[in-house]
Amino acid sequence: MSNDIAKGDWKQLSGAIKHTWGKLTDDDLLRAKGDGEYLVGRLQEYYGLTKAKAEQSLHELGYKLRGEQRRVATSDRRGSGDDVTTERLDR
């Protein structure tokens, strides 16, 4: 996967996360790019979510914690509307 596509995927995902949880700052999202557990902790702190609920909510948006692969809709790039598995973006 090209670096530009990975950056674009992260921009879309981080935008969806910030739209859903407006209390998260840009700094929170920048750190979360490399540390999913940090993001889970922030959701717990800001919104009073349990760890399981925070992880589930992130999973529903397409954010995967360490050891998982991210699935991103790529209908605009491939024209098929199918999801494809992409590599981790938190390196």
Image (spheres, rainbow, N blue to C red):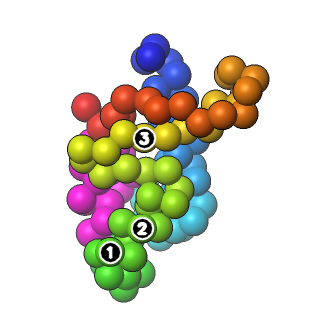
Residue 38 in the image: state x and y as whole percent.
Answer: 25, 59
Give the distance between the C-alpha atoms of the residues marked 1 and 3, in whole angstroms: 18 Å
Given the image, on which type of amino acid does mark 2 rest?
Gln
Among the two numbered marks 1 and 3 on one chain, the one whose residue lies closer to the N terminus: 1
Residue 64 in the image: state x and y as whole percent.
Answer: 37, 50
Q: Is residue 40 magenta?
A: yes
Given the image, on which type of amino acid does mark 1 rest?
Ala
**Residue occupying image coordinates x 44% and y 30%:** 86
Name the residue nearer the viewer: 69 or 24: 69
Q: What residue is pinned by disc 1?
A: 52
Among the two numbered marks 2 and 3 on one chain, the one whose residue lies closer to the N terminus: 2
Q: Is residue 88 left or right of residue 82?
A: left
Q: Is residue 11 left or right of residue 40?
A: right
Given the image, on which type of amino acid does mark 3 rest?
Arg
Name the residue nearer the viewer: 67 or 36: 67
Q: What residue is pinned by disc 2?
A: 56
Structural crowding at the residue carrying mark 2, measured as other residues with C-alpha within 10 Å and reported as few (<14), some (14–19) or many (≥20): some
Among all residues in the image, which is located at the extreme top? 2
**Residue occupying image coordinates x 42% and y 41%:** 70
Residue 33 in the image: state x and y as whole percent.
Answer: 34, 43
